[in-house]
Amino acid sequence: MRVPGVIAYVASALSQHGVNIVHIGSCYTDTVIVVSKEDLERAFTLIVRHIERAREMLSTQDPRGSPS
């Protein structure tokens, strides 16, 4: 993974919202996070929300990486 801390960030976001991670498997290009059926919808919604926020933040930066 080229960006350190991604798994820690996702795990932290999930735990802050009461989602228990059952298992994490990760290799260079893929990460699999297993949660219970009861937590599945909440976990998916949280991850999608964080991805959308990241995309919004990236779209507001100029090409050099600083906020516009």
Image (cartoon, rainbow, N blue to C red):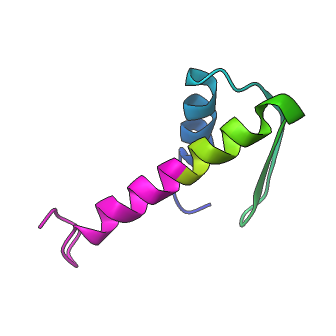
Work out whether 56 lies above or below 13: below
Q: Position of residue 19 (x, y in %)?
A: 70, 26
Q: Which residues are magenta?
A: 49-68
Location of the N terminus by quadrant is bottom right
Work out whether 44 lies above or below 11: below
Q: Position of residue 20 (x, y in %)?
A: 76, 24
Magenta residue check for 7? no
Work out whether 12 lies above or below 48: above
| Residue 52 relative to residue 64: left or right | right
Q: Does residue 36 appear anywhere in the picture?
A: no
Magenta residue check for 54? yes
Residue drawn at x 65%, y 20% is 18
Q: Does residue 25 appear anywhere in the picture?
A: yes
Residue drawn at x 55%, y 63% is 2
Location of the C terminus by quadrant is bottom left
* Quarter where residue 9 is shown: top right
Q: Position of residue 17 (x, y in %)?
A: 59, 24
Work out whether 5 lies above or below 16: below
Residue lying farthest to the bottom in this orientation: 63
* Quarter where residue 40 is shown: top right
Is residue 26 or residue 56 the one in the foreground? 56
Residue drawn at x 57%, y 30% is 12
Residue lying farthest to the left in this orientation: 68
Please count the marks in the image: 0
Q: Position of residue 32 (x, y in %)?
A: 80, 51
| Residue 39 relative to residue 63: left or right | right
Is residue 23 or residue 18 the one in the foreground? 18
